[in-house]
Image (cartoon, rainbow, N blue to C red):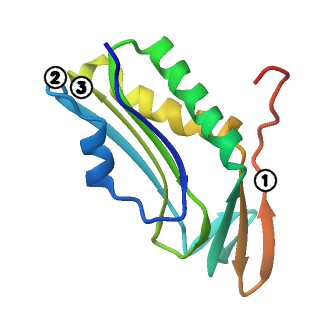
Amino acid sequence: MSFPEIFAITEDELDLNALLAAITLDSTGAAAIFTGMVRGVTVRNHPHETTYLEYEAYQPMAEAKMKQVAEEIRARWPSIEGIAIVQRVGRLYPRTPTVLIACTAAHRDTGVFEAARYGIDRLKEIVPVWKKEVGPQGEEWVEGDYHPRPGE
């Protein structure tokens, strides 16, 4: 059986209802959804205001890495039915959703929560998305802590 998957880099608003509908089957009884958002105040090193974030991505590679994340999810949690991994790019303001990870399954106790958590953690690790934080204090490219190993 083929399960629905969505991998996308987009400038469009995230439509949670449409994305959820696209990965829901007749057998689906549970969905776990993570949505990351732009913070207006960031506490990293010191609290500071964020006016907006600028996200960039290399779309072909990012979507290929999103597919890799989905394959890893399926290997760990074979009961997962649908998977959506969507990252917005462009200029995004506080309180705006920036990323969505959604996993569906027949039941809530089949790893659906853990799969969604794994999805966002791996996206942050291996998907080539870059973020510039802009505020009254200036601008800064924000780097993650992860550095891919060969083969990732």
Q: Nearer the viewer, mark 2 or mark 1?
A: 2
Which quadrant does the C terminus fall into? top right
Above or below for 61 versus 97:
above
Above or below for 41 versus 8:
below
Image check: 85 left or right of 79? right
Residue 71 is situated, as x and y percent measured from the top left of the image, at 53, 20
Q: Nearer the viewer, mark 2 or mark 3?
A: 2
Q: How dense is the environment of label 3, judged by Cα within 10 Å: few (below 14), some, or many (20 and up)?
A: some
Element under disc 2? loop
Above or below for 47 versus 19:
below
Kind of residue at badge 1:
Glu
The one nearer the camera, 15 or 47, is: 15
Do tag 2 and tag 1 residues touch (Cβ < 8 Å)?
no
Q: Which residue is mark 1?
A: 143
Can you tell which quarter of the image residue 1 is in?
top left
Do tag 2 and tag 3 residues touch (Cβ < 8 Å)?
no
Residue 102 is situated, as x and y percent measured from the top left of the image, at 38, 39
Q: Residue at x 66, y 48 (%)?
A: 59
| CA separation in Å, label 1 and label 3 | 34 Å
Residue 56 is situated, as x and y percent measured from the top left of the image, at 70, 60
Kind of residue at badge 2:
Ser
Q: Residue at x 67, y 69 (%)?
A: 54
| CA separation in Å, label 2 and label 3 | 12 Å
Q: Which residue is mark 3?
A: 108
The one nearer the camera, 10 or 55, is: 10
